[in-house]
Image: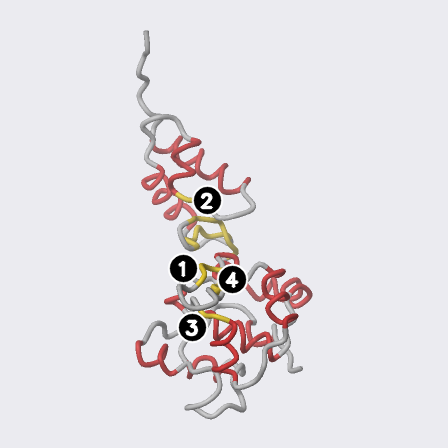
Amino acid sequence: MTTDFPPPPLDQQARMVEAILFASAAPVTLRELAARMPHGSDPAEALAVLRRIYDGRGVVLERVGDGHAFRTAPDLSFLMQTETLETRRLSRAAVETLAIIAYHQPVTRTEIEEVRGVALSRGTLDQLIEMGWVRVGRRRMTPGRPATYVVTEAFLDHFGLESARDLPGLSELRAAGLLESRPPAEGLGLPLAERDNDADMIPDGPAEDLFEDE
């Protein structure tokens, strides 16, 4: 005979979610939380409790894509600058390629080359894929069925973005020094993002220091 037990109190559910998130190396989705918690638990409500608890603390609860994770508070990101600079160094070609993929995804290699106006080195895409910031998407239903490329949740997580729609516009990228020498109507083809007003902020942290020219 099966006995139905009531779900744990909400504060206990919040403790469970807290433990799961701290132990996970990657953001955890609501479905994954529900699968680990006792039957009848409400992970969404537990997350809301945790957000209130961690509001204003050195560690905050953030949504990353479809998942949730604890991250350093944005105003304290300068404390992580040394570690970030040591692990993320990109050439100008890689920066441009990453920006094109982020703003125009899903995008093929040929389309990337058309936007940049120059041939794309195989190593540039390989570097972005190895970093975990870009992955291969679905193949186009066109002759040759070329592969497409999209940014990953790791990319969104690194720059504190909930989705690709939170990417900064053209003026913000220029202000950060990433498009310093490029005229408005050329180069990365970003006026689309600015026209749509997809976002009006640059990600927190020393993003402009992560890149170097070829």
Residue type beneath disc 2: Val
Q: Nearer the viewer, mark 4 or mark 1?
A: 4
Report the quarter where the C terminus lies: bottom right
Instruction: Verify CB contact (< 8 Å) between mark 3 and mark 2.
Output: no
- The colour style of the image is secondary structure
Q: Quick one: label 3 or label 4, which is nearer the N terminus?
A: 3
Q: Identify the amino acid type marked 1.
A: Glu
> Which of the pair 201/109 is nearer the observer?
109
Mark 2 crowd level (few <14, some 14–19, many ≥20, 10 Å Cα)? some
Q: Quadrant of residue 212?
A: bottom right
> Sequence-wise, which precedes: disc 2 or disc 4?
2
Name which of mark 2 and mark 1 comes first in the sequence.
2
**From this viewpoint, which residue is outermost toward the right?**
86
Per the image, label 1 sits on a secondary structure element best described as: loop
Say which mark, if any, is on residue 110.
Answer: none
x, y percent for residue 192: 35, 79
Dot 4 falls on a residue whose secondary structure is helix
| Residue carrying label 1 | 162
Is 213 situated left or right of 163 in this image? right
Name the front one of labels 3 and 2: 3
* Amino acid type, callout 4: Phe
* Left or right of 187, for residue 122: right
Q: Which residue is denoted by mark 4 in the rendering?
A: 155
For label 3, the residue is 103
Residue assigned mark 2: 28
* Sequence-earlier tag: 4 or 1: 4
Residue 28 in the image: x percent, y percent?
46, 44
